[in-house]
Image: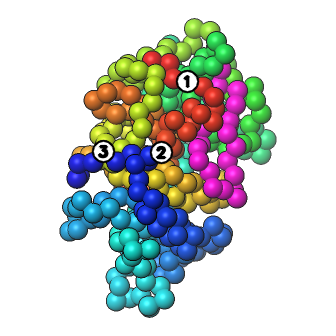
Amino acid sequence: MAKSDLTRAAIPQSLTEAKASAVAAFLSTESIPELSALAARSDPKHNVVGVGLGHKMVRGKPTKELCVRFYVEKKLPKAALSRQHLLPDTVKGVPTDVIQSGIFRAFAAVPKERTRIRPARPGCSVGFAFTGAQAGTVMAGTFGAVVEAGGKRFILSNNHVLANENTLPVGSTIFQPGLLDKNSPASDAIAKLTRFIALSVNGPNKVDCAIAEIADGQVSATVMPKVGKLKSNQPLPAAMSMKVMKTGRTTGFTTGTINDLSADVKVRYDLGSLTFSDQIIIVGGAKPFSDSGDSGSLIVEQTSKRAVGLLFAGSDQFTIANHIEDVLGQLQVSLVA
């Protein structure tokens, strides 16, 4: 990656305005019906799943030129598209780039066994119990970090990991491991759902996050295997090309690079297709940075060991995260280092 220390605060106004124009024109919030057979959509409003900012890619390598990025479900050859379906080469004078990302989805878990850990620690499997018509369904996500407020400590993860996309009542039991991972509900409760930031189908959303108050003696603040202990409870602003790491329930310890600081994206949930604004996008190193079940992982800068983001979604190639300062601010909590 091209070296850069560009942060959100340092993004030029011309790029911000160009991105906003592109979002308004091409990131449709309308409901697009799923296709029942394999087909590719050529209309940009059906194909564009995100708009962000980053270094323009030429022959697979980043340049120093900053651009507006169109993330598309499927990159189609220009020769196959009519003129009205071509994405523009520039927006408000800013060059553009088109990147195939696939569909972004919230990272619900796939069936893989994970173990019981006591005291529980960040990076391990956690989850809730489905109720009502969904009773008997099992899931698991990732315990991201320990946070505190008002003299109490809480597990930090995603809304869709701890609160089932707005549907669980405050006080619901949180388990470690999650019930997908051969959990024993009678003995594996570690916390109670305390607060979540509601996900909105009308958007745009800024965060997917929730906290659960920790039961005495059930949790350690030690941060993630191979990542180690946070060196500070103060978050670090994400920067372009920053090297980051995480430990998640499914893929364990992975490393990656921040590829986008301020992307607006559409993410598939059970609730529907939700829009998120101003998100971090990360690409993995030798292997993908994340997979289903890693939702809720804390993303940490490799050298300073300070928190940068909260992982919540992605595709086969890309991981999407909330800026951690947005998460902490909306939940009104601070990290425990």
Specify the segment rendered in magenta: 194-214
Is 279 on the left or on the right of 58, as rendered?
A: right
Q: Are marks 3 and 2 in contact (CB under 8 Å)?
A: no
Asked where in the image residue 164 lies, by quadrant, the reply is top right
Cα–Cα gap, marks 3 and 1: 25 Å
User: Is residue 245 found left or right of 296 in the rendered image?
Assistant: left
Residue 334, numbered label: 1
Foreground tag (1 vs 2): 1
Q: Disc 3 marks which residue? A: 5
Q: In the image, what residue type sits under mark 2? A: Ala
Specify the label residue 321 is tagged with.
2
Q: Where residue 121 sits in the image (x, y, percent)? A: 47, 20
Which mark is nearer the camera, 3 or 2?
A: 3
Rounded to the nearest angstrom, the CA distance separating label 1 from label 2 is 18 Å
Of 272 and 263, the residue lying toward us: 263
Magenta stretch secondary structure, dominant? loop
- The amino acid type, in three-letter code, at marker 1 is Ser
Q: In the visual, does 284 lie left or right of 290?
A: left
Label 2, secondary structure: give it: strand
Badge 2 density bin: few <14, some 14–19, many ≥20, Cα 10 Å: many
At x 67% / y 39%, what residue is drawn? 197
Q: Position of residue 200 (x, y in %)?
A: 69, 52
Query: The residue under label 3 is which amino acid type?
Result: Asp
Closer mark to the observer between disc 3 and disc 1: 3
Q: Along the polypeptide, which appears first: circle 3 or circle 2? A: 3
